Image (cartoon, rainbow, N blue to C red):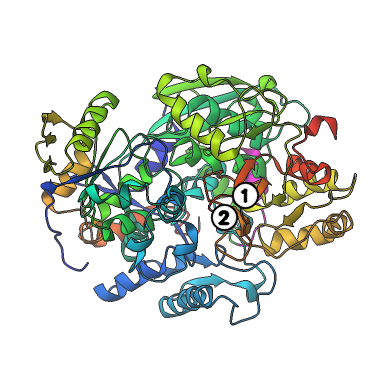
């Protein structure tokens, strides 16, 4: 029996087995940002310990950074204090910081791959649950809390229990207007928001193999929304071509040696899995969430499911969600009026996402009364977009083009919903209050669908626009 | 946080607060705007702030019967979503020392263990019974025995699940992982040297 990628990478990084039964796992790449690292640095300072592998630790600022004026000091004194703390910690410990002035700042899960830091066969940790994004490269990447950020800073290791692996095969071809975002929303809808607890998800099958690395990142990004702390795609030629020539990727002959090693970390054809699930790509439709967790979603042209269709113990939750969202079972989301359109985030803030949204934006004008934000995932993404003339397309259509950051995905910066505003969003979470207003509402969908909603002023089936 | 051993967390005794509902995410436990801080101090005041405000006083955390409780009883998939340790930190600072529920999201669970806070699970039916019992008599003292893996309430003692690894960390006082991981010493560097990518291929 062959072995899967997770088991191979796990064994390669095992320092020792701990008495608790967990593994002391070496972390090959530690990414840090301003929100979850300050307390960890304070803690190692108290312990009198220094960052163990500063050359394997990289920082950026993304959660709190404004997407309009970034002049220092930042207008929000709390944000300024966090930024200053990150700068001080990185300087003190010799950690590379990609700040706004470096021209390479961006969302941590966007810049890791684009700099070539993220590579197959690595273990990656970051104090952010969407670290699963890096699994798109065949890395084992997990989100951690601040105490574990301290663990990695001090020891370059984590104490972790080895997860089981569920292979999710998406076979066949996606229909026009159906994106990676729809695939992962469908997977979460089918397997549930807690279906992945204790598992790493291996995404496979012809539909996944046909995806670009950026699309694979969108899928892996939302593994955590399905309860799986990690998700990955086996590395293949597309992975290696993405990495070739990137700043932190191996160069020249070393690159060829790396490819051989990377290839060997992929799951064997006869690998063993704790569970296997298969989805038919052709059955996936453009999908929109209607509720307050990412599993509460529906095809855009289908009615919201009747409460009776839920298992008895899930009905109260569905009812609460409908009430909060002010939506009714039996009705379709199509035509639901939107107040705000947000394009961006670590899920869908990459160049291919902006291209798809721009393709839609080109066809019309933002509807009166709709507030929009287009937030590139990084400076690199923004530069590429400028080369392709995308900001101009968005601006002429009436969209607001911004500077890179997490922005309204979690609204830690000035970009927020207000009151009961309903937001068509390309981000990853539709939790109550997530986008900055305690009573604000979020509909998750693909970036192209968000652009369409902005133009029409209402939830729109992208297949009618393209 | 320094030192090689943490205080063992074998039992947690105290009154409990009943917080019903499934899939309660960490954005609800501590809304992101309160994370614009460089320490965890003061987070306790903002635990469930938006939910409490919308409930206008009708929230378990504002219920006088549950004042000064130390065990939080929850539903399914509690703590899902964001990895923010600010969530258990806020609940810890609010006075909670243990969580019992139907299930917990993985990162939340790990964050709790790292703070010495046990998360124990029960089947949905038994959880309902425990919640009903506590709502009927909020003055009762519960005992969560992490070592024996039991929960005792007025209605009796029921078995709970705590995974072996977490149980060992809590009972042995090895939940401060940094101290444990540091003990590996040079083995860490040796593991790094074996990895071709650390060596530049």
Q: Quadrant of residue A376?
A: bottom right
Report the residue at 49% width, 20% height from top: A310
Residue A56 in picture, x, y percent from top left: 45, 63
Q: Does residue A406 appear anywhere in the picture?
A: yes
Judge the density around disc 1: few (<14), some (14-19), many (≥20) Cα neighbours within 10 Å.
some
Q: Quadrant of the N terminus of chain A?
A: top left
Q: Quadrant of residue B154?
A: top left
Report the residue at 52% width, 38% height from top: A293
Report the residue at 20% width, 44% height from top: B16
Cα separation between marks 1 and 2 = 7 Å
Which residue is more in the foreground, B184 or B192?
A: B184
**Is A62 drawn above or below residue A350 in the view shown?**
below
Residue A133 in picture, x, y percent from top left: 54, 46
Which residue is more in the foreground, A62 or A193?
A: A193
Which residue is more in the foreground, B3 or B53?
A: B53
Q: Quadrant of the C terminus of chain A?
A: top right
Q: Earlier in the sequence, mark 1 or mark 2?
A: 1
Q: Residue furthest top?
A: A308
Q: Is residue B3 left or right of residue A260?
A: left
Secondary structure beneath dot 1 equals loop
The residue labelled by disc 2 is A437
Residue B194 in picture, x, y percent from top left: 37, 53
**Is B146 drawn above or below residue B84 in the view shown?**
above
**Is A364 drawn above or below residue B86 in the view shown?**
above
Secondary structure beneath dot 2 equals loop
């Amino acid at each position: 029996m062959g072995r899967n990628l997770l088991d191979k990478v796990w064994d390669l990084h095992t320092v020792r087995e701990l008495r608790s039964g967990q593994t002391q796992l070496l972390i090959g790449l530690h990414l840090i940002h301003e929100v979850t690292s300050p307390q960890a640095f304070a803690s190692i300072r108290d312990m009198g310990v220094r960052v163990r592998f500063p050359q394997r630790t990289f920082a950026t600022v993304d959660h709190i950074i404004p997407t309009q004026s970034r002049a220092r000091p930042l207008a929000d004194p709390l944000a300024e204090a966090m930024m200053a703390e990150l700068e001080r910690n990185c300087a003190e410990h010799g950690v590379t910081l990609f700040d706004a002035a470096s021209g390479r700042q961006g969302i941590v899960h966007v810049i890791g791959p684009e700099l070539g830091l993220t590579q197959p066969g690595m273990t990656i940790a970051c104090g952010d649950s969407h670290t699963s994004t890096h699994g798109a490269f065949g890395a084992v990447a997990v989100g951690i809390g601040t105490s574990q950020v301290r663990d990695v800073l001090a020891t370059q290791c984590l104490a972790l229990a080895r997860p089981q692996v569920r292979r999710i095969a998406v076979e066949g071809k996606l229909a026009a207007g159906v994106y990676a975002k729809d695939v992962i929303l469908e997977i979460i809808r089918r397997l549930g928001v807690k279906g992945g607890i204790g598992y790493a998800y291996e995404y496979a099958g012809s539909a996944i193999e046909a995806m670009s690395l950026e699309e694979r990142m969108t899928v892996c990004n939302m593994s955590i929304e399905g309860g799986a702390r990690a998700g990955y795609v086996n590395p293949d030629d597309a992975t290696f071509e993405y990495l070739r020539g990137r700043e932190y990727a191996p160069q020249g002959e070393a690159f060829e040696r790396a490819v051989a090693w990377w290839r060997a970390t992929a799951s064997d054809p006869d690998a063993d899995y704790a569970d296997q699930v298969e989805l038919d790509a052709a059955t996936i439709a453009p999908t929109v969430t209607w509720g307050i967790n990412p599993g509460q979603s529906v095809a855009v042209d289908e009615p919201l499911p009747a409460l009776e269709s839920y298992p008895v113990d899930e009905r109260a939750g569905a009812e609460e969600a409908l009430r909060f969202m002010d939506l009714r079972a039996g009705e379709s989301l199509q035509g639901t009026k939107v107040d705000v359109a947000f394009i961006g985030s670590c899920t869908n803030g990459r160049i291919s996402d902006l291209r798809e949204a721009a393709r839609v934006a080109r066809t019309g004008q933002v509807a009166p009364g709709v507030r929009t934000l287009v937030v590139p995932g990084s400076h690199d993404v923004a530069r590429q977009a400028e080369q392709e003339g995308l900001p101009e397309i968005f601006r002429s259509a009436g969209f607001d083009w911004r500077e890179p950051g997490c922005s309204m995905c979690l609204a830690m910066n000035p970009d927020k919903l207000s009151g009961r505003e309903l937001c068509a969003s390309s981000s990853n979470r539709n939790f109550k209050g997530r986008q900055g207003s305690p009573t604000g509402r979020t509909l998750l969908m693909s970036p192209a669908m968000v652009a369409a909603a902005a133009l029409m002023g209402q939830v729109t089936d992208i297949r009618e626009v393209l | 946080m320094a030192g090689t051993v943490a205080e063992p967390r074998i039992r947690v005794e105290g009154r409990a607060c009943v917080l019903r509902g499934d899939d309660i995410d960490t954005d609800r436990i501590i809304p992101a705007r309160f994370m614009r801080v460089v320490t965890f101090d003061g987070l306790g005041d903002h635990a469930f702030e938006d939910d409490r405000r919308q409930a206008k006083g009708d929230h378990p955390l504002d219920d006088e019967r549950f004042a000064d409780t130390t065990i939080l009883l929850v539903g399914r998939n509690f703590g899902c979503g964001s990895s923010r340790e600010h969530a258990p930190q806020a609940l810890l600072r609010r006075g909670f020392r243990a969580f019992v529920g139907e299930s917990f999201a993985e990162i939340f669970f790990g964050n709790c263990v790292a703070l010495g806070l046990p998360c124990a699970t029960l089947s949905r039916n038994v959880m309902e019974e425990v919640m009903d019992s506590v709502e009927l008599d909020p003055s009762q003292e519960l005992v969560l025995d992490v070592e024996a893996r039991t929960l005792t309430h007025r209605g009796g003692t029921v078995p709970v699940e705590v995974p072996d690894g977490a149980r060992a960390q809590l009972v042995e006082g090895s939940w401060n992982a940094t101290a444990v991981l540091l003990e590996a010493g040079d083995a860490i560097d040796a593991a790094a040297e074996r990895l071709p990518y650390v060596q530049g291929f």
